[in-house]
Image: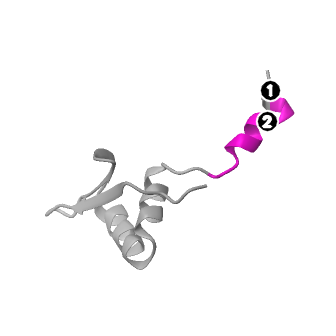
Amino acid sequence: MGRPQGFAYAVHGDGTVVITHRGRAAATLRGGRAAKFLAEAESGDAQLVMARWTGSYRFGNERTAREHPRNRR
C-alpha cells in the first residue's frame, strides 16, 4: 500500500476547512470537526490524516477479500 498523496487543505476566514484531493473538493469541515482536524493534521502526517478524514484510503486487504471463496462468482 502506497502512501497517500495529492491532498491539500485550506482554512477559510469563518473557520471552515476544505480538504482537496488533486484539485477537487473532497470534504468540508466546520466547527468542532474542523478544529479537531487541524489539531490532528498539525501534529502528525498531514497527508495520512487528510486521507483518513476524507475516506480516500485503502486498508490493504482488498485483493485478499476479492479472492475469498465467499466473494467469487
In space, the residues marked 2 and 1 are separated at their CA atoms by: 7 Å
The amino acid pointed to by label 2 is Glu
Q: Is residue 62 magenta?
A: yes
Disc number for residue 67: 2
The amino acid pointed to by label 1 is Arg
| Residue 11 spot, x, y in % from top left | 22, 63
Secondary structure under the numbered disc 1 in the rendered image: loop
Up-down relation of residue 66 to residue 12 (above or below)? above
- Residue beneath disc 1: 72
Up-down relation of residue 55 to residue 16 (above or below)? above
Q: Is residue 60 magenta?
A: yes
Which residue: 37% across, 76% down?
42
Q: How many numbered discs, if any?
A: 2
Q: Are marks 2 and 1 in contact (CB under 8 Å)?
A: yes
Disc number for residue 41: none
Q: Badge 2: few (under 14), some or many (20 or more) residues near its Cα, within 10 Å?
A: few
**Dividing the picture into quarters, in which one does residue 40 lie?**
bottom left
**Labels 2 and 1: the sequence-earlier one:** 2
Along the viewing direction, whichever of 15 and 7 lies nearer the viewer: 7
Q: Residue furthest top?
A: 73
Secondary structure under the numbered disc 2 in the rendered image: helix
Along the viewing direction, whichever of 17 and 59 lies nearer the viewer: 59
- Viewport quadrant of the C terminus: top right
Give the magenta range: 59-70
| Residue 26 spot, x, y in % from top left | 35, 46
Q: Residue furthest left?
A: 13
Q: Badge 1: few (under 14), some or many (20 or more) residues near its Cα, within 10 Å?
A: few
Relative side of 59 to 42, left or right? right
Q: Residue furthest bottom?
A: 43
**Magenta stretch, overall SS:** helix
Up-down relation of residue 15 to residue 1 (above or below)? below
